[in-house]
Image (cartoon, helix red, strand yellow):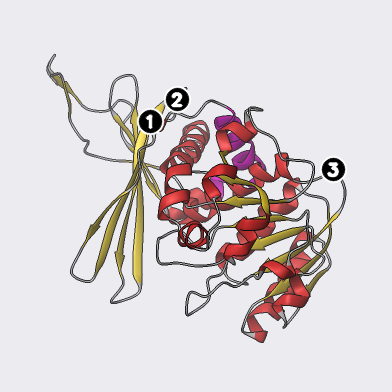
C-alpha cells in the first residue's frame, strides 16, 4: 500500500453465526452491557436508526460509536416482508485508524443483546429477594429474556403463557430442565401475570392489541417490554404506563416517540416523558427506582448494544484464533 492508503492489518475478520454462538455467553454479555451503560449517555454517538423502504420490505441501519470503546460501526438489517426473510450484518471500524476490523453475522447478537441489556437493567430494578416471574410469549425472544433474567434474578417460580398450548408446554419443559427452575405453562395470561413480581413481555398480539392488561399487574412489579419496537406495534396496556413510577428506556428518544406503547400511553392522557429515564442514568447511579410503584424497562434496541457485544466477541475471537480473515480488504485512505 501507499502512504495515502492501506488495508486492515490484521486482516478484516469475518465472524459467522456459528462463531458468535461459540464465543458468546450470558454472563459476559450482561457484564459488558452493564459496564457500557454506566457511562453517561451521548446522543450524538448513537443517533436514531435510519430506515429505507424497499419494494418488498426495508433496510434498517443502526449506527453507534460507544464512548470509550475501541470500535464504532453499525448493524444493518435487510428484511423481505413479502417472503418473511431477514439478514443482519454488523460492521466494526477501529476508532483510532478507521480500518474495518470485522464483519459479524448479527442474527444471534440481536437476540443476545436485547435480553442481556434487559438483564443489566434488572440488576438495578429488582428487589434483593426471590420473585415470581411471568413470561408472556414462548418464542425466541421470550426464551432469551428468561435465560438472561435467570442470571441476575432470584427466580422462585416462572409461569409462561402464550396462545399456542404446544409452544408454551415445550417452553416450560425445556427451560425447566435447562435452567433448573420450576417453569409452569399457563393458558390464561391473566393467571400467569397476577401476583408476579417480574413480568417479561416478549410477544405482540396478532392484532396489535395489548398482551398485558394493567389490572393484572401488581403494584410494585417490574415489567420488561421488548416486543413493541415501532410506532404501529403494541404490547402494553397504556394504563400500565399511567400507573408506573418509572420507565427506563434503552434508547429514550426512540422509546418515547417511536414505540407504539408509549405513543398509545400519551394518547390515553398519560405523560410518559415525566417518568422516563435513560438506562445510562439508571446504571450510572444518576437515577433510581422509587420505593413504590411499577417500574417498566422499555426497549426498542440500539446499535450501541450491538457494537458493545460485537467488540467483546471480536476480542475473544482474536484471542482464540477463531473467525475467518478475509483474503481481500476494504481500503482505508488518507483524506
Going by the image, does 169 lie left or right of 206? Answer: right
In the picture, the quarter occupied by the C terminus is top left
Cα separation between marks 2 and 3: 31 Å
In the picture, the quarter occupied by the N terminus is top left
Going by the image, does 246 lie left or right of 176? Answer: left
- Which of the marked residues, 2 or 3, is nearer the chain's N terminus? 2
Give residue 114's position: percent from left, percent from top. Answer: 54, 51
Q: Quadrant of residue 44?
A: top left
Can residue 185 be seen at all in this image of the molecule? no
The mark total stands at 3
Q: Of the residues tagged 2 and 3, which is closer to the observer? A: 3
Disc 1 target residue: 45
Residue under the image location 33 percent in, 27 percent down: 10
Tell me where the magenta segment starts and ends, as one range: 22-38
Give residue 80's position: percent from left, percent from top. Answer: 29, 69
Disc 3 target residue: 128
Mark 3 element type: loop
Disc 2 target residue: 67
Amino acid at each position: 500500500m501507499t502512504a495515502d492508503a492501506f488495508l486492515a492489518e490484521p486482516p478484516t475478520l469475518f465472524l459467522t453465526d456459528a462463531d458468535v454462538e461459540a464465543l458468546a455467553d450470558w454472563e459476559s454479555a450482561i457484564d459488558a452491557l452493564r459496564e457500557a451503560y454506566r457511562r453517561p449517555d451521548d446522543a450524538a454517538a448513537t443517533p436514531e436508526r435510519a430506515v429505507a423502504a424497499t419494494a418488498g420490505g426495508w433496510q434498517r441501519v443502526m449506527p453507534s460509536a460507544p464512548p470509550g470503546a475501541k470500535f464504532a460501526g453499525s448493524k444493518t438489517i435487510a428484511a423481505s416482508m413479502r417472503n418473511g426473510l431477514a439478514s443482519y450484518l454488523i460492521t466494526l471500524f477501529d476508532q483510532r485508524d478507521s480500518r474495518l476490523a470485522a464483519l459479524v453475522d448479527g442474527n444471534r447478537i440481536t437476540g443476545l443483546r436485547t435480553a442481556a441489556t434487559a438483564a443489566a437493567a434488572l440488576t438495578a430494578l429488582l428487589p434483593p429477594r426471590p420473585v415470581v416471574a411471568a413470561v408472556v410469549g414462548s418464542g425466541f425472544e421470550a426464551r432469551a429474556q428468561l435465560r438472561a433474567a435467570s442470571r441476575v434474578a432470584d427466580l422462585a417460580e416462572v409461569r409462561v403463557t402464550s396462545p399456542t398450548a404446544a409452544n408454551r408446554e415445550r417452553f416450560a419443559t425445556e427451560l425447566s430442565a435447562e435452567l433448573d427452575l420450576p417453569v409452569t405453562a399457563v393458558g390464561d395470561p391473566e393467571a400467569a401475570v397476577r401476583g408476579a413480581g417480574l413480568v417479561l413481555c416478549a410477544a405482540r398480539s396478532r392484532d396489535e392489541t395489548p398482551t398485558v392488561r394493567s389490572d393484572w399487574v401488581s403494584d410494585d412489579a417490574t415489567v420488561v417490554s421488548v416486543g413493541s419496537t415501532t410506532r404501529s406495534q403494541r404490547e402494553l396496556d397504556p394504563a400500565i404506563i399511567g400507573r408506573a413510577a418509572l420507565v427506563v428506556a434503552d434508547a429514550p428518544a426512540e422509546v418515547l416517540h417511536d414505540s407504539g406503547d408509549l405513543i398509545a400511553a400519551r394518547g390515553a392522557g398519560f405523560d410518559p416523558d415525566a417518568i422516563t429515564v435513560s438506562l445510562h442514568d439508571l446504571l450510572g447511579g444518576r437515577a433510581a427506582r422509587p420505593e413504590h410503584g411499577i417500574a417498566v424497562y422499555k426497549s426498542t434496541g440500539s446499535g450501541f448494544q450491538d457494537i458493545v457485544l460485537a467488540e467483546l466477541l471480536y476480542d475473544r475471537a482474536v484471542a482464540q484464533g477463531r473467525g475467518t480473515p478475509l483474503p481481500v480488504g476494504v481500503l482505508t485512505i488518507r483524506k
